[in-house]
Image: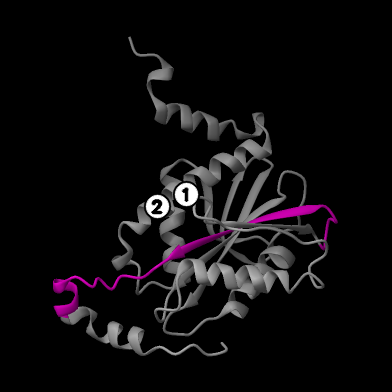
Amino acid sequence: MNSFNDFPEAQEYAMRAIAPRISYEKFVEKLYMDIDSILSLMMDGVGHLLDLDETGISFLIWTNLKSKNYDAQLDSDKNGNADISVTSDTYKWIAEAKIYGGKNNYGLNHIYQGFLQLTTRYSKCEANADCGGLFIFIKPRGRTETEKSIMDSWLNMLNNKKNEIKNLVLTPHSLNERSLFSEHDHVVSGYRYKVRHMPLCLLHLPEDKSGLDSKKYEEARIAYESFEVKNW
């Protein structure tokens, strides 16, 4: 006869269902592992995401979290419409999502507005709610824009905001840990608030022969190759 331990899915569901019986830190750690799995899966179908806006991409993340049995909400009312939130009893995690680049030429200031929305509007940094997330959906406009270059620029921008963000400490991204982390004194509670800044780089312009010959990539390729860096 099979035991409970023979069913990993049941174990995972049970862990989420009894999250308040584990530490908030373990709850967030497991959540980040699952989010990484979701983002990795989405990278396998980047071509299907290129035309989606922030809401559309966030919807896919939300549906995947729901499929993993999280109590996840989309556009939930958390002192405003937070893009994604995950709760379990008193445990709470809130995330905002912003696009970099794309047809609207969103820049770092657009991402920073998302950071401010998360940290000064949606989150109040109460007990068991001192972690949040910022999804950065990167839509490169030219060869100079890669996941690393944008995250490097975002890190530099945050470094330059240390006079505005109280006691800000940054942990840079790397090859293995693509996300960067920030921690600062929350304006409401005064306690430390931790944000995981998570990139998802959406580019699909294959340069093999069939990709170069394909008409469906032609317009996007012309714009990509002719892009010039400006101060956005």
Is residue 170 shown left or right of residue 187? Answer: left
* Residue 218 in the image, given as x and y percentages of width and height: 22, 84
Who's the residue at 42% across and 76% down the image? Answer: 140
Which residue is at the far top? 1
Disc ID at residue 36: 1
Question: Who is closer to the viewer here, 231 or 52?
Answer: 231
Query: Any magenta on residue 196?
Result: yes
For disc 1, the neighbor class at 10 Å (few under 14, some 14 to 19, many from 20) is some
* Residue 231 in the image, given as x and y percentages of width and height: 57, 89
Q: Which residues are magenta?
A: 187-214
For disc 2, the neighbor class at 10 Å (few under 14, some 14 to 19, many from 20) is few
Check the image and report above or below for 106 versus 146. below
Q: Secondary structure at mark 1?
A: helix
Question: Pointer 2 and pointer 1: residues touching (CB < 8 Å)?
Answer: yes
* Residue 18 in the image, given as x and y percentages of width and height: 59, 30
Q: How is the image coloured?
A: one colour
Is residue 119 shown left or right of residue 223? Answer: right
Question: Who is closer to the viewer here, 8 or 227?
Answer: 227
Disc ID at residue 40: 2
The reply to whether residue 98 is visible in this rendering is no
Who's the residue at 35% across and 74% down the image? Answer: 51
Q: CA distance from mark 2 to mark 1?
A: 6 Å
